[in-house]
């Protein structure tokens, strides 16, 4: 595939790795924020190929994993309502909530549809005028503009039985929260590629400016990631942290201004609960007042009851980069991809699932 | 979750386009990239083109990768 194969060239990767080995002198800790990067790093064995000076940590960049149990419980409560169809991306369906999961609710008779795109959810609403269709809006800035577009489309096409349970979250505030917690002593951050395709690289500028931490926006192929690591090593060794882009074919410094405009026209920033981290101010997106009729939390009275976290699960500290799955007593024993206890084992890009598939026991 | 893959735009009809992904044809929305044209590669995420791939920047990055490798 064009723009993919050439970034997997083993000879270039080998030479780039030699360069990183030669230039990396300080002991540094780099966090890849995005779950897609975690998978790519493990799939290509990049952790093992980097010099001992570089320790890689995985961050909270998996939207399924960071969805709080209390929020997932709301989706399940909606699914249990009469004449409601809940449409969701597939990963979310298997995540255990406090008392059930969307999958269990479906087995018990709830109408839950797995969709590939929010457009599919809109089509289900068109085809089922006698039912209410609620789309479980998860995802970061990459996905939120698509959901905003669907709300505008519903308005134009007068699809009135469609609403969003907005659990969308935005990335720069959680990066700040992780840094403010001070639990992981980071030297650099591999910034998310497709979030940045939307928001650009400017929103990360506070990281070098206020925290003195290096940043590089990366793509998802091995050479993209190695180039980002090379940039971070260069910034750290020279003592000049800044924000660089190793993924220029997909990310402009200003991002996709059209998508941001659309997202901001439908959503406004709100506080949000992150699994394992808690409430982070101004880190979520809710529908603006003028789109209130598309807001499932306003359209329905949702009372899921108090949230309960799975016992013994350390997804929270894994999401903060404080622990690895290997430190979890449940990992590979009671918690597996077939029978997951926590969300990081459910999502295909969750840190636990990634360790399960790619890291030998 | 934030997965996006390159796709080549074959035809455009209003805000909808047909793209080719390794021989597979799919319909995608261009609502987020209205300036996209036939022949552009876009990054496709959950049925939406979220970014137009900048071919000149792709070439620059390959050049940079080769330079860095040769400078060893």
Image (cartoon, rainbow, N blue to C red):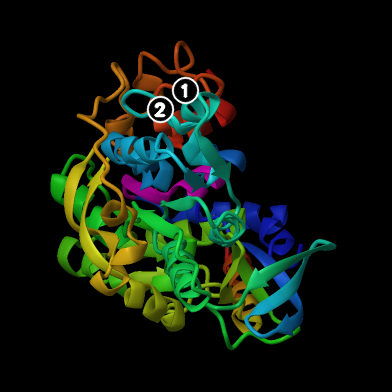
Observer-nearest of A301 and A57: A301
A87, A226: nearer the viewer: A87
Residue drawn at (51%, 49%) of the image: A36
Q: Residue at position x 85%, y 62% from top?
A: B23
Helix, strand or loop under label 2: loop
Q: Where is the N terminus of chain A found, in terms of image quarters? A: bottom right
Residue B32 can be seen in this image? yes
Specify the label residue A340 is tagged with: 1
Which chain's residue wears label 1? A
Residue A122 figure quarter: bottom right
Quick check: A17 above or below A68?
Answer: below
Q: Is mark 1 on a helix, strand or loop?
A: loop
- Which residue occupies the extreme top position in the image? A333
**Left of A297 or right of it: where is A7?**
right
Residue in front for this viewpoint, B40 or B59: B40
Identified at 61% across, 43% down, the residue is: A44
Question: Are the two marked residues, 2 and 1, in contact with CB atoms closer than 8 angstroms?
Answer: yes
Q: Write down the region rendered in magenta.
A: A26-41
Residue labelled with disc 2: A96
- Is A73 drawn above or below residue A54 in the view shown? above
Which residue of the protein is positioned furthest toward the right in this rendering? Answer: B23
> Residue A347's x, y, as percent?
49, 37
- Give whichever of B25, A306 is nearer the camera: A306
Q: In this view, does A261 lie above or below A171?
A: below
Measure the C-alpha gap from mark 2 to mark 1.
8 Å
Using the image, tell me which numbered label, if any, was put on residue A281: none
């Amino acid at each position: 595939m064009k723009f993919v194969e050439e970034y997997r060239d083993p000879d270039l990767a080998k030479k780039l790795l030699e360069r990183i080995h030669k230039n990396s002198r300080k002991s540094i800790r780099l966090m890849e924020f995005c779950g897609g990067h975690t998978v790519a790093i493990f799939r290509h064995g990049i952790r093992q190929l980097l010099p001992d000076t570089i320790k890689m940590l995985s961050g909270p960049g998996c939207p399924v994993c960071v969805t709080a149990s209390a929020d997932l419980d709301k989706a399940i409560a909606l699914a249990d309502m009469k004449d409601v169809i809940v449409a969701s991306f597939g990963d979310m369906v298997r995540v255990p909530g406090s008392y059930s999961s969307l999958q269990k609710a479906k087995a018990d008779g709830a109408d839950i549809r797995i969709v590939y795109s929010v457009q599919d959810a809109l089509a289900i609403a068109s085809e089922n005028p006698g039912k209410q269709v609620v789309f479980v809006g998860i995802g970061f800035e990459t996905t939120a503009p698509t959901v905003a577009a669907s709300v505008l489309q519903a308005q134009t096409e007068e699809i009135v039985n469609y609403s969003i349970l907005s659990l969308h979250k935005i990335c720069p505030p959680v990066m700040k929260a992780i840094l403010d917690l001070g639990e992981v002593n980071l030297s650099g951050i591999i910034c998310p590629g497709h979030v940045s395709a939307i928001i650009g690289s400017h929103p990360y500028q506070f990281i070098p400016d206020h925290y003195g931490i290096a940043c590089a926006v990366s793509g998802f192929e091995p050479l993209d990631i190695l180039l980002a690591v090379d940039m971070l090593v260069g910034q750290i060794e020279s003592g000049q942290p800044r924000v660089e882009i190793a993924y220029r074919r997909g990310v402009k410094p200003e991002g996709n201004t059209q998508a941001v405009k659309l997202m901001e026209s439908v959503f406004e920033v709100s506080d949000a609960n992150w699994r394992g981290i808690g409430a982070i101010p101004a880190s979520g997106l809710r529908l603006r007042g003028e789109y209130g009729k598309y807001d499932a939390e306003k359209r329905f009275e949702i009372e899921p009851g108090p949230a309960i976290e799975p016992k013994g699960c350390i997804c929270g500290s894994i999401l903060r980069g404080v622990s690895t799955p290997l430190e979890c007593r449940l990992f590979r024993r009671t918690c597996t991809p077939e029978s997951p206890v926590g969300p990081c084992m459910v999502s295909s890009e969750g840190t636990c699932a990634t360790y399960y598939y790619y890291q030998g026991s | 979750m934030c997965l996006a893959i390159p796709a080549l735009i074959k035809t455009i009809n209003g805000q909808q386009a047909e793209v080719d992904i390794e021989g597979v044809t799919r319909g995608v929305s261009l609502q987020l990239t209205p300036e996209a044209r036939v022949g552009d590669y876009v990054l496709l995420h959950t049925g939406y083109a979220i970014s137009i791939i900048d071919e000149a920047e792709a070439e620059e990055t390959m050049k940079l990768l080769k330079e860095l490798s040769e400078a060893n």
